[in-house]
Image: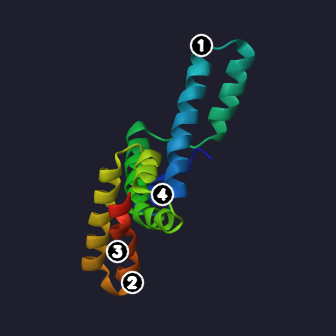
């Protein structure tokens, strides 16, 4: 599996968040096993060597690129999950808490994303439905 550099590049150039997360995890597992290989007991070193021989090698910068792209993709997709949460009855305070931000920051993020969607993809979105959950913020 070590000769999988092409698949790392494919993941980095593609938009599949699962593949990007695999690159990130492969790097982290590799780092863990390299540490075991350097400091572990003999049997642990043997296991580490076996694992490292089978796992694809991912450079630290590739892992960082994969992480950044995954975060970007997940953040870009967050708005429609917020919409679903609002339609299911979640308050802006609950959404903000789930995201680790204030209710106002959650509301502002959603509003900006809806405005971006309306400008860039007006035909692919039900703007009225998207705005309906935005406007309910007055009750929160």
Q: Quick check: 107 left or right of 48?
A: left
> Is mark 1 in CB contact (under 8 Å) with mark 2?
no
Query: Which is more N-terminal, label 2 or label 4?
Result: 4
Mark 4 vs mark 3: which is more N-terminal? 4
**Residue indicated by mark 2:** 124
- The image shows residue 28 at horizontal and vertical percentages of 53, 35
The residue under the point 44% across, 53% down is 95
On the question of residue 129 being in view, the answer is yes
Q: Earlier in the sequence, mark 1 or mark 4?
A: 4
* Residue pictured at 40% horizontal, 49% vertical: 96
Residue 66 appears at what percent x and percent y?
43, 49
Where does the image place residue 51, in percent across and percent down from the top left?
67, 34
**Residue on which disc 4 sits:** 11
Q: Is residue 14 visible?
A: no
- The Cα–Cα distance between marks 1 and 3, rounded to whole angstroms, is 56 Å
**Image vertical order of residue 123 relative to residue 51, above or below:** below
Q: What residue did someone put label 1 on? A: 39
Between 74 and 14, the one lying in front of the other is: 74
Estimate the spatial distance between the alpha carbons at disc 4 and disc 3, rounded to whole Å. Answer: 34 Å
Q: CA distance from mark 1 to mark 4?
A: 32 Å
Q: Is residue 57 above or below residue 105?
A: above
Q: Quadrant of residue 132?
A: bottom left
* Mark 1 vs 3: CB contact within 8 A: no
Q: Is residue 53 left or right of residue 131?
A: right
Image disc number at residue 131: 3
Q: Secondary structure at mark 3?
A: helix
The foreground one among 46 and 25 is 25
């Amino acid at each position: 599996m070590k000769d999988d550099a092409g698949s790392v590049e494919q993941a980095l150039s593609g938009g599949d968040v699962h593949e990007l997360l695999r690159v990130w995890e492969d790097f982290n597992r590799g780092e863990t096993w390299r540490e075991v290989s350097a400091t572990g007991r003999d049997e642990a070193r043997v296991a580490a060597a076996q694992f490292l021989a089978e796992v694809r090698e991912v450079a630290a910068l590739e892992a960082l690129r994969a992480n950044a792209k995954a975060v970007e993709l997940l953040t870009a997709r967050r708005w429609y999950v917020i919409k679903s949460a609002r339609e299911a009855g979640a308050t802006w305070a609950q959404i903000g808490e789930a995201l680790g931000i204030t209710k106002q920051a959650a509301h502002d993020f959603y509003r900006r994303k809806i405005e971006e969607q309306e400008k860039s993809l007006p035909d692919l979105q039900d703007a009225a439905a998207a705005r309906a959950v935005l406007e309910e913020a007055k009750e929160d």
